[in-house]
Image: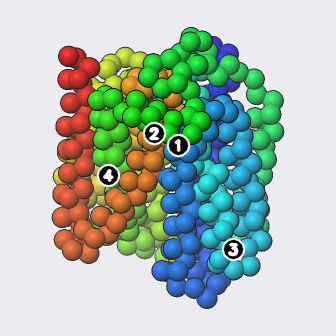
Amino acid sequence: MDDNDRAIVSFTGLAHALVHTYELSVPIFVVVWLTEFPVTTATLGTAVAVGYALFGAGALPGGVLTDRYGSNTLVTACLVGMGASFLLLSVAPSVPVIAVALGLWGLAASVYHPAGLALISKGVEARGTGFAYHGMAGNAGIALGPLVTALLLLVVDWRVVAALLVLPAVAAVAYARTAEFDETAAVDAAASDGGGSVDGSPTSLTAFLADSRALFTAGFTLAMLVVMANGLFYRGVLTFLPDVLGDFLPPVGDVVGLFADSPLAAEFDLASYLYVGLLTVGIGGQYVGGKLTDRIPTATGMAAVFAGLAVVAVGFVPAARAGVGPLLAVSALLGFLLFALQPLYQATIAENSPPGGRGLSYGYTYLCSFGVGAAGAAISGYLLSAVGVDGTFLGLAVFPVLGLGFALSLWRLGDS
């Protein structure tokens, strides 16, 4: 990568890590809020859902704004908004105010993915490597964010932790104000002004609908179906995975030994640490998936990863029941493949959309991934209650099988 590539990847990687740090810190806070406030899990879950819903729903307008105002402006606004929302969260006196703070976070965070990915796709010459490092940074936030939050909660009040989490956003904004890079270095001037079928940012609802119709070519539509299949499997598998892993792990006393009766053992959740480990392995998956986008057709890579995920989904429970060793192996493989897919479909979106509408294209991408994909949590919850763990993983295997079919169709379309 050249200097411009490195500047963009550093900027987007930092912001990406923070988005997911904040996202995954919320479930850790939920445990505290349930004891801090007189509230039911249903009520608190609804409050939290407000933020997550806006996180997905705001991606599409975020993409439109990216095409109009540029990625640097939108990512910086995202960082300011996330920091401000957690500052409000740190002084929230009640659950309704918590819901407002999380809603503000969701709105601010929703613009990141269309803005950040549009910036990489248009400004980074070594695009595959850029997607790889960007994904790795996101996984670092996914894995380390909740871990750091949990460790801080051991020593200070939750309000102090929320306030401390504002500091990384302040530092990131300071860096954003000094970062210099060319947002369109990887595309020519004509293309960056709209080129292809989409002519820049739509200026009215009629123009938005026209640009959207132009964007949804056969290739882009198939790419969206790939993203939906991935989102449904991703959210379906990860939502209840910590609880599921606990069913296959030995009692905590067998792990901590002589410390089984200590306060440490009472707080020690082996399934949670295995879950964090699985997410950490995803960093390697992001790197490999990103590198593959520069070396093989992305549709081929996605087909291979989806095939692997289907096999893992079918074999996960039998492997988990075979012992701790097979459980660790299949969990690592799941984490690797699940995140290897992301840079592959991100590059596919870039290949099937014009540079001038890249923000809009990634807006649709994350509306499908986070919005439609959120239904995966409801599906897995229903399956767990209706058919148990075995039936749940077999049922969720349908999504990578569908993804495999969509990826092969995309490959055939590109080969024709």
Q: Amino acid at mark 4?
A: Phe
Residue designated by label 1: 205
Residue farthest toward the bottom in the current orientation of the protein: 38
Residue at 54% of width from left, 21% of height from top?
194
Classed neighbour count for the residue bearing mark 2: other residues with Cα under 10 Å, few (<14), some (14–19), many (≥20): few
Q: Earlier in the sequence, mark 2 or mark 3?
A: 3
Across and down, in percent, residue 161 comes to 72, 64
- Marked residue nearer the N-terminal end (4 or 3): 3
Image point (64%, 84%), residue name? 37
Q: Which residue is mark 3?
A: 97
Residue beneath label 4, please? 233
Q: CA distance from mark 4 to mark 1?
A: 33 Å
Tell me the amino acid under the disc marked 3: Val
Q: CA distance from mark 1 to mark 2?
A: 6 Å
> Toward the viewer: 175 or 121?
121
Residues marked 4 and 3 touching at CB (< 8 Å) = no
Question: Where's residue 369, x and y in %?
Answer: 41, 47
Mark closer to the chain start, 4 or 2: 2
- Amino acid, disc 2: Leu
Q: Position of residue 294 (x, y in %)?
A: 41, 18
Say if 42 sits above or below 391 in the image: below
Q: Quadrant location of residue 404?
A: top left
- The image shows residue 409, relative to residue 368, as above or below, that is above
The residue identified by callout 2 is: 209
Secondary structure of the residue carrying numbered label 3: helix
What residue is drawn where x is 62% and y is 39%?
65
- Residue at (25%, 28%) from the top-left corner? 410
Q: Which three-letter amino acid code belongs to the residue tagged 1? A: Leu
